[in-house]
Amino acid sequence: MKCKFFLAAALFAVACSGKADVIYGQNLIVNGDAEAGVSGWAGYPGYNMVQSVDYGNNWVLPTQPGPVDRGTKMFAGLGQYAVASQTLDFGVPTAQNSSYSLSGWLGGWAAQGDNALFYVQFLDAANNAIGNASIGPVTPQDRGNQTGLFYRESVGIIPAGTSKLSFWLSMERLASTDNDGYADNLSFIARQITSPIPEPGMAPMILLGLGMLVGTLRRNKRAQMS
């Protein structure tokens, strides 16, 4: 359900976006740690907005699992579904020489199934979706039925021609009255690839060449020892 929602809603986030430069090696998420409330994030019509809450008794204690460098606040859900988005429009399409790391701390409350999902959609200049990546949800089984946040990361190659990054954070309530989907320290980092990526057909040839080289070195070493 969530993936369909994100695909259908991407154009709304694009309409709320502004131009910005991609700064390689730095987090491109605005206010990914909730320390500035929900500043930098936009809501979505028909859904509750996520909320910024203090670490504490009603959510996650500072002593419970979560980021070592956590601040005083984190994101939590509100109502049955809570959604927030932000879009980075950097105008000039990327070449096929950039990688990404999408990461964050996601979690929930004890054995309840409430959860959070963090999603990025790669869009071209015409707002066509040309790729996506996500982290979460972190299930109660993943958490060992304990309250807290746990690190998740997805890495890959930014599709060539990407002009916009559309980010979505959603929390889903499955039990009780509070929406205990949690998130903190959300991050998207782009990096330029300095060495060329081998074509699919080249990888076996490279491995074969390395194998032959290792075999030759071993034979030469045995010959010198005999």
Image (cartoon, grey):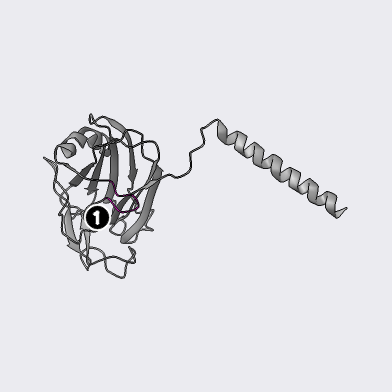
| Residue to which mark 1 is pinned | 32
**Rendering coords of residue 7 (x, y %):** 25, 34
In terms of image quadrants, where is residue 4? top left
Q: Determine whether 155 is above or below 105 in the image.
A: above
Q: Nearer the viewer, residue 25 or 147?
A: 25
Tell me the kind of residue under disc 1.
Gly
Q: Determine whether 205 is above or below 19 in the image.
A: above
Farthest bottom residue? 63
Residue 27 covered by magenta stretch: yes
**9 sits left or right of 97 in the view:** left
Which quadrant holds the N terminus? top left
- Magenta-drawn segment: 22-28
Q: Nearer the viewer, residue 172 or 3?
A: 3
**Rendering coords of residue 205 (x, y %):** 61, 34
In terms of image quadrants, where is residue 8? top left
Q: Residues within 10 Å of mark 1 (few under 14, many from 20)?
A: many
